Amino acid sequence: MKNGEGGENEEVVSLEMLRKKMDDFAKARDWEKYHSPRNLLLAMVGEVGELSEIFQWKGEVAKGLPDWKEEEKMHLGEELSDVLLYLVRLSDSCGVDLGKAALRKIELNAIKYPAIKHNDHCVGDAEHSSGKTKLNEEN
């Protein structure tokens, strides 16, 4: 599939495409024997640590990272990708359809945290102003 967004023909990336590429990558290197759920989880946690280091001393940063250098944004993209790829590999190793699980979780969160309708301001203003914004919660 191709996407004409931005004037360029870019391939649409799906979780299934990433899952297949990661599976092929591991098989080609005979790494499957090392890709147990535990090992994949620990590797992913290590990558989350590397991702955290990028933000460690920056304080709050604006959306879009306007003050970041291009090299910093590139490095961020690499570390985000590492986390995503390990997550996709882990879900595959566990037999979990990550896309379906994520959609289900969004539905459960919508039930758990129903949208609040306000006449005066946007949904979520009260939560933001009190510092208690919740995007997701365990369970």
Image: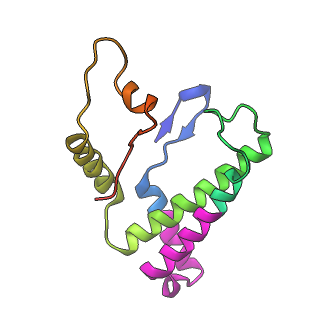
> Residue 116 appears at what percent x and percent y?
26, 27
For this rendering, which residue is in front, 9 or 60?
Answer: 60
The quadrant the C terminus occupies is bottom left
> Residue 131 appears at what percent x and percent y?
46, 37
Question: How many tags in the picture?
Answer: 0
Left or right, 82 with respect to 95, comes to right
Left or right, 108 with respect to 58, comes to left
- Residue plotted at (28% across, 51% down): 105
The residue furthest left is 111
For this rendering, which residue is in front, 31 or 48?
Answer: 48
Q: Is residue 71 above or below residue 25?
A: above
Q: Is residue 8 above or below residue 20?
A: above
Examine the residues drawn in magenta and state their main secondary structure. helix
- Residue plotted at (66% across, 63% down): 50
Residue 27 highlighted magenta (yes or no): yes
Protein image colouring? rainbow
> Residue 8 appears at what percent x and percent y?
61, 31
The residue segment tinted magenta is 20-49
For this rendering, which residue is in front, 102 or 55?
Answer: 55
The residue furthest front is 130
Q: Is residue 51 above or below residue 103?
A: below
Left or right, 112 with respect to 70, comes to left
Instruction: Give residue 107's quadrant in the image.
Output: top left
The residue furthest top is 120
Q: Is residue 61 above or below residue 76?
A: above
Residue 23 highlighted magenta (yes or no): yes
- Residue plotted at (68% across, 35% down): 65
Left or right, 100 with respect to 82, comes to left
- Residue plotted at (27% across, 45% down): 109
